[in-house]
Amino acid sequence: MNGPQDMGGLQGYGPVNAEPNEPIFHADWEKKAMALTVAMGFTGTWNIDRSRFARESLGPANYITWSYYKIWLSALEQLVKDYELASAEEIAQGKSVDAPAAVKRVLKAEDTPAALAKGGPVVRDKAGAPAFKPGDVVCARNFHPTGHTRLPRYLRSRQGVIHKARSAHVFPDTSARGEGEDPQWLYSVRFKATDLWGDEANPNDHVHVDCWEPYLERV
């Protein structure tokens, strides 16, 4: 979706100012927010693409003004309500009211280091061959989905060159909608900075973006 998370190339928001010696967490509640989000992800109730879409759907005013982990926590609250794991009343009271709903898996503290080290690989097998090869000139499709997508808005209708053909990966657009993994070939595509940002960009600069095959058209 063309939400507030897709800010690449937009003007009027000022510079991104790095915080010197920034801590990983600014408050103890942020640690809990991350732990809860990771633990609930491991239940298998939803996938990472659905989780990302929940954050994107919080609304521009909230997404832009809230802190990073405030966004995580608010999206998690919405997800547990959407999947009927907790009610709005329970979240407001901070305690269970009804019997707990069953989940597929429970991440225990002693299993966490190994589970995090394993990660969640998204490489998949796919029959056939990639449609593009390194050196092919392609154009990013111009589309504006209402759901989740990983194609940045600033790339749409822009030409690039296939830099590297990767393996097939879970397609986030269908994954976020609950329509299955639908593995698609993934490419590293090289775009000229001047094609993206105009003549004021450095002509020697390029941007490399990983793009799934359905995002691209042959030129």
Image (cartoon, grey):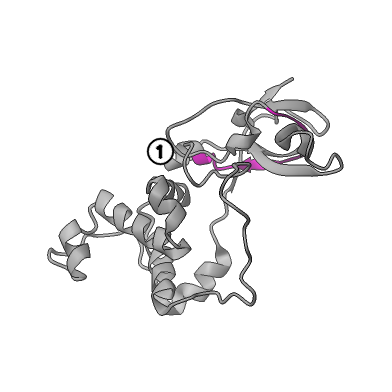
Q: In this view of the protein, which residue sits in the foreground, 90 or 110?
A: 90
Q: Secondary structure at mark 1?
A: loop
Where in the figure is residue 87, as x and y percent of width and height? 19, 57
183 on left or right of 49: right
Where in the figure is residue 181, as x and y percent of width and height? 49, 40
Asked whether residue 195 is drawn in magenta, I would say no
Q: What residue is pinned by disc 1?
A: 177
The part of the chain drawn in magenta is 158-172
| Quarter of the C terminus within the rendering | top right
Where in the figure is residue 69, as x and y percent of width and height? 44, 64
Give the amino acid type for the residue marked by disc 1 in the picture.
Arg
Question: In which image quadrant can residue 139 be found?
Answer: top right
185 on left or right of 160: left
- The residue that appears at 39% across and 55% down in the rendered structure is 44
Please determine whether, in this image, residue 38 is positioned above or below residue 24.
above
Secondary structure predominantly adopted by residues drawn in magenta: strand
Q: Is residue 133 visible?
A: yes
Residue lying at the far top in this picture: please name it. 219
Please determine whether, in this image, residue 211 is positioned above or below residue 77.
above
- The residue that appears at 56% across and 77% down in the rendered structure is 23
15 on left or right of 37: right
- The residue that appears at 47% across and 47% down in the rendered structure is 49
Question: In which image quadrant can residue 189 be found?
Answer: top right
Residue lying at the far right in this picture: please name it. 204
Please determine whether, in this image, residue 142 is positioned above or below residue 193.
above
